Image (cartoon, rainbow, N blue to C red):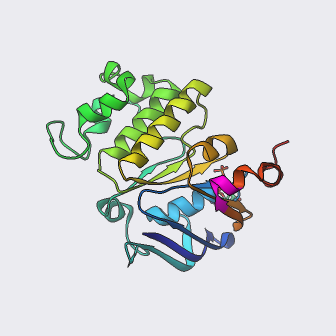
Amino acid sequence: MLEIRDLYSGYGDAVVVRGVSLDVMPGEIVALLGRNGMGKTTVIRCIMGLVPPQVRSGSITWRGESLLGLRAHDIAGKKIAIVPQGRRLFPSLTVTEHLTMLKSASAKDGWTLDRVFGIFPRLAERRHHRGGQLSGGERGMLAVGRALMIDPELILMDEPSEGLAPVMVQHLEGIIVDLKKEGLSILLVEQNLYSALAVADRVYVLETGRVVHHGTAEELNNQTDVLFQRLGVQ
Ligand SMILES: Nc1ncnc2c1ncn2[C@@H]1O[C@H](COP(=O)(O)OP(=O)(O)OP(=O)(O)O)[C@@H](O)[C@H]1O
């Protein structure tokens, strides 16, 4: 349903994604792994229509329709949401305001404020707090909650576990697995191999903008030595 073929992309003269092809099927969790600077965020930004980078060549299709040339707003309208790196929250807006920016607080269909507060009780407690007052874990939850409020069919998550305490990472893994059970597809950018293998159905490893390894999480569980080498972890 998301199909990327031979994608080349970069910034100015620098090409940082070189011939990436990947698929995310309905209800599937796919992890995109790689060290810093290998092109993971660039792939996510290309899917979401965020500029920069510029797409040089290749294709990105969603349900058979090209996403290239569409703006991020239109892509969100096609039920693709992003949990961006760094979370991109507004320091002066409250938790509730973040969640109701794109959908009214009284909406009854799909993901509602109550439903988001149901999976993240901590956000309910902090509903009147502003973005700038939240802890790292709360910011991560809010970024996921905000993405859910567009009723996505695919969520692009860019290092959602970054900066979180281990207990929060586990909580998030549980949420990701629950979202999959609801039929959502997730493309998960991760640096943490164990976190990726804990939730993903399939994994792609990027190195200097190319896919150098891919397989099911089950297959890759038996090849963690190779993966750790690829990821530069001892
Ligand atoms: N706005 C930009 N302008 C110029 N170069 C950029 C820009 N953003 C990223 N790059 C470069 O593109 C390459 C890939 O970066 P990208 O952010 O996609 O990597 P990543 O795998 O997501 O790493 P990280 O985990 O550090 O985000 C890096 O060499 C980076 O320096």
Nearer to the camera, 86 or 200: 200
For the C terminus, the quadrant is top right
* Number of marks in the rendered image: 0
Q: Identify which residue is drawn at 69% across, 70% down.
A: 14
Nearer to the camera, 219 or 115: 219
Locate residue 181, reporting x and y percent: 40, 47
- With respect to residue 55, does 104 lie above or below? above
- Which stretch is magenta? 215-219
Would residue 40 be visible to someone looking at this image?
yes
For the N terminus, the quadrant is bottom left
The part of the image, by quadrant, that contains residue 205 is: bottom right
Q: Residue furthest bottom?
A: 57
Q: Is residue 127 left or right of residue 103?
A: right
Nearer to the camera, 13 or 234: 234
Q: Identify which residue is drawn at 56% across, 66% down.
A: 53
Report the predominant secondary structure element of the magenta stretch. helix
Would residue 89 be visible to someone looking at this image?
no
- With respect to residue 3, does 170 lie above or below? above
Q: In this view, does 229 lie to the left or right of 75?
A: right
Q: Is residue 117 left or right of residue 35?
A: left
Q: Identify which residue is drawn at 38% across, 61% down.
A: 72
Locate residue 204, reporting x and y percent: 65, 60
Q: Is residue 216 magenta?
A: yes
Locate residue 18, reporting x and y percent: 68, 73
Q: Is residue 54 left or right of residue 74?
A: right
Q: Which residue lies furthest to the top in this view?
A: 125
Locate residue 97, reporting x and y percent: 27, 34
- With respect to residue 65, does 88 lie above or below? above
Q: Is residue 6 magenta?
A: no
Q: In which quarter of the image is ligand 1?
A: bottom right
